[in-house]
Amino acid sequence: MQLRRIFTLLAVVGTMTLTACGGADQFAAYHSQPDDNGTVSLSHQNFQQDEDSDVWNSSLPTQQATVGKAEDFPVPANPPVVDNENTINLPLQPATVDPNMEPTHGSVSEEQIAKDRPKASEVQGTAKLTPTVYFFPVFDEDKKSCPDSEKVTLHGQGGKALIRVCKKSSLACGLQGSCSIKQKGKIRMLNILARIKGQNRYFEINREECKYGYGDRTVCLDPFHTLAADLKVYKLGEVIYIPSVIGLILPDGSLHDGYFIIRDKGSGINGRGRFDFYSGFVPWYESTNPFKRIGLADKTTSVPYLRITGAKAKEIQARRSYPSIPKDNQPFK
């Protein structure tokens, strides 16, 4: 079966759903620690090829990636084979959530798309995904604070008190997995280390190493190129290809290549095809967030994705400097 042409995303109308990511046991498995005083062991997890093919629960749509409602597609008797002689069309002028805004995608030539798409042998499987978006919240409590009586303490390893913050800030830090707090002119960037005895434990982010925070283990989060997924289903470092995202205009003006790397997991991210898209310092609810504009902050959105292996997966990992991030990767906001 050919890999069908994938065209534009439809406009999204509906309530955006905020999903917890960078979950409670992010960065280190607290359940493996013998007690609260033990030292957390941090080590890279090597990328492994997944020999099991994805579940083929739908064929690719013949015309449009569905946004906002599900469509039933026939289940193929056998997994289809990608035909690399067939050209994938990029949506040049897709619909946006707000038609008065600038286009969501820029122009990418057929030649560029053909050159960068994976070979048939590198496509392990495909299905349709269910998305949400998470981000790195930033709080300036010098400008907008709360009475000390309403503040709560964020704790580090061993239960050591790190900082007292407004309850709203605390909730966002726990939900998103990382955050930045400014108090008395000093900025503290925090990441969840573990959850012990019902309490989140944090550590201070090394901004020279992972300036957008950490995903799972010591893997750096890479804005607009990171997915959080269920690591019981997917491998840390696995490459996911989403053709409908090709050409998406990012905040720095660059165009997306359609490739993502699984660098994180989340407490609410469970099952096959369930992905949380990381947007760095750009909140999921802002109208300028490119993921929101094409419907990826809405769990009712449904678009095809492909699992990529082999040489192409290694190429994409190198392109994004996995498990680190590209040196020229600057904050978008």
Image (spheres, rainbow, N blue to C red):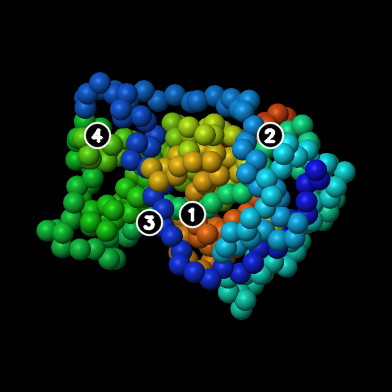
- Given residues 277 and 288, the one toward you in this image is 277
For disc 2, the marked residue is 124
Of all residues, the one furthest to the left in this rendering is 149
Q: Which mark is residue 82?
A: none
In primary-sequence order, the first of circles 3 and 4 is: 3
- SS for dot 2: strand
For discs 1 and 2, the disc positioned in front in the rendered view: 2
Residue pictured at 38% horizontal, 42% vertical = 267
- Given residues 58 and 91, the one toward you in this image is 58
As displayed, is residue 138 above or below residue 86? below
Q: How many marks?
A: 4
In primary-sequence order, the first of circles 2 and 4 is: 2
How far apart marks 3 and 1 lie (CA) works out to 16 Å
For disc 3, the marked residue is 138
Are circles 1 and 2 on residues that touch, CB within 8 Å? Answer: no
How far apart marks 1 and 4 lie (CA) works out to 26 Å
Residue pictured at 18% horizontal, 51% vertical = 152
Q: Which mark is residue 133?
A: 1
As displayed, is residue 218 above or below residue 153? above
- SS for dot 1: strand
Horizontally, residue 161 falls left or right of residue 243, namely left
For disc 4, the marked residue is 196
Q: Position of residue 32 (x, y in %)?
A: 32, 24
Q: Quadrant of residue 106?
A: bottom right
Q: Position of residue 275 (x, y in %)?
A: 52, 47
Are circles 3 and 1 on residues that touch, CB within 8 Å? Answer: no
Q: Amino acid at mark 4?
A: Ile
